[in-house]
Amino acid sequence: MIIRPRRLRLTQAIRDMVSETRLSPSMFVYPVFIREGHNIIEDIPAMPGQKRYSPDTLPRILERAVRAKIGAVLFFGIPGHKDECGSSAYDDDGVIQQAIRTAKREFPELTVIGDVCMCEYTSHGHCGVLKGDYVDNDATLELLAKTAVSQARAGADIVAPSDMMDGHTGAIRTVLDENGLHNTLIFSYAVKYASAFYGPFREAAGSAPAFGDRKSYQMDPRNVREAVKEALLDVHEGADMIMVKPGLPYLDVLKTVKESVNVPVGSYCVSGEYSMIKAACANGWLDEKRVVLEAVTSIARAGADIIITYHAPEIAEWLA
Ligand code: PBG
């Protein structure tokens, strides 16, 4: 039970001692965009403070993450070449594979998560291969599994499929195991909504769909029981951790999912959430440190074990 002061004034130390929610640097994951090329560090206009790095400049930002002792980094690749079937995604010398190798060579103790999806790699921008104007679920599973294997071989500790195809976790687990990659964990985006909050990410990664939308494979924001169904399916297929995405607007979903599964649950505080805070702070309307810490505290209070956020390095430094 929480101590309720009446006439008694509590010190900050006592408030800390009895607080119900605690944050630590190790629960935060930092997403990083890596583009093909050399000597590149470029701004992402819709995400002030975030940049695209080429594999050779990547260690500069990773050094900060390592020093702040954050839990992991999550890599998104932006390839130089896109085609119908997203072949750069599973190229052993692709941009994300190069980035993973660089990160593990420079910082062997840093946990590296690879994003497994097709939308940054396909010319049409959808998260899978197309049959007519539909995404072909089962043909996509094969390519996702190949992508996961090539990332694991490059040294990824964890693969994170964000495509929302049915059966992705089982397909990836099977092929990882067939290739002897038993120690690679799967952090599945089990519960990912068709959200307008991904806008800035699509600019950052150049991954907006060329036609239509993602409503046939991402979830309807009106549904929460469906989230439990998706989460249980992924756990059954062998997910080691699962994700709910976006973050702050979906705390009810996060809490419900957390109560339904027995694996760690992550919450992804997405690009639009980041950019809203940044825009308000640039106008002097909000205090960035206080508002960011309150947002992630709320996400942790709702049940997140892991929080993926573009503010991860700052948060870890503030907590230290
Ligand atoms: C790729 C993917 C997206 C995000 C993560 N992985 C975009 C999308 O589904 O369109 C969004 C992350 C963010 O907004 O920060 N499928």
Image: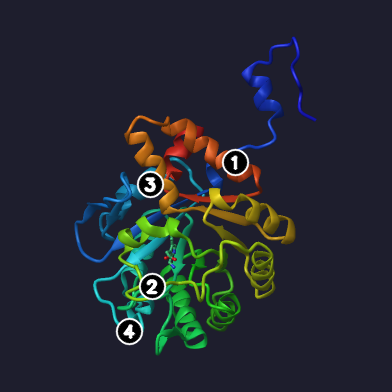
Residue 320 visible, this orientation = no
Q: Amino acid under label 3?
A: Ser
Image-quadrant location for residue 23 = top right
Q: Calculate the distance from the C-alpha at mark 4 to the C-alpha at mark 2.
A: 10 Å
For the residue labelled by badge 2, is the local secondary structure a helix, a strand or a loop?
loop
Mark 2 or mark 3: name the one nearer the start of the chain. Answer: 2
Q: Calculate the distance from the C-alpha at mark 1 to the C-alpha at mark 3.
A: 18 Å
Mark 1 or mark 3: name the one nearer the start of the chain. Answer: 3
In what quadrant does ligand 1 lie?
Answer: bottom left
Between residue 121 and residue 30, name the one nearer to us: 121
Q: Which residue is mark 4?
A: 84
Kindly check if marks 1 and 3 are in contact, taking CB atoms under 8 A apart as contact: no
Colour mapping: rainbow
For the residue labelled by badge 1, is the local secondary structure a helix, a strand or a loop?
helix
Mark 4 or mark 2: name the one nearer the start of the chain. Answer: 4
- 240 vs 90, left or right, is right
Q: Residues within 10 Å of mark 2 (few under 14, many from 20)?
A: many
Q: Amino acid under label 4?
A: Glu
Residue 119: image location, x then y, percent? 38, 72
- Mark 4 vs mark 3, foreground winner is 3
Relative to 42, say whether 218 is above or below.
Answer: below
Image-quadrant location for residue 12 = top right
Q: Amino acid under label 2?
A: Cys
Q: Residues within 10 Å of mark 4 (few under 14, many from 20)?
A: some
Q: Which residue is mark 1?
A: 298
Between residue 269 and residue 147, name the one nearer to us: 269
Label 2 CB-ligand 1 distance < 8 A: yes
Query: Residue 275's mark?
Result: 3
Q: Which residue is mark 2?
A: 119
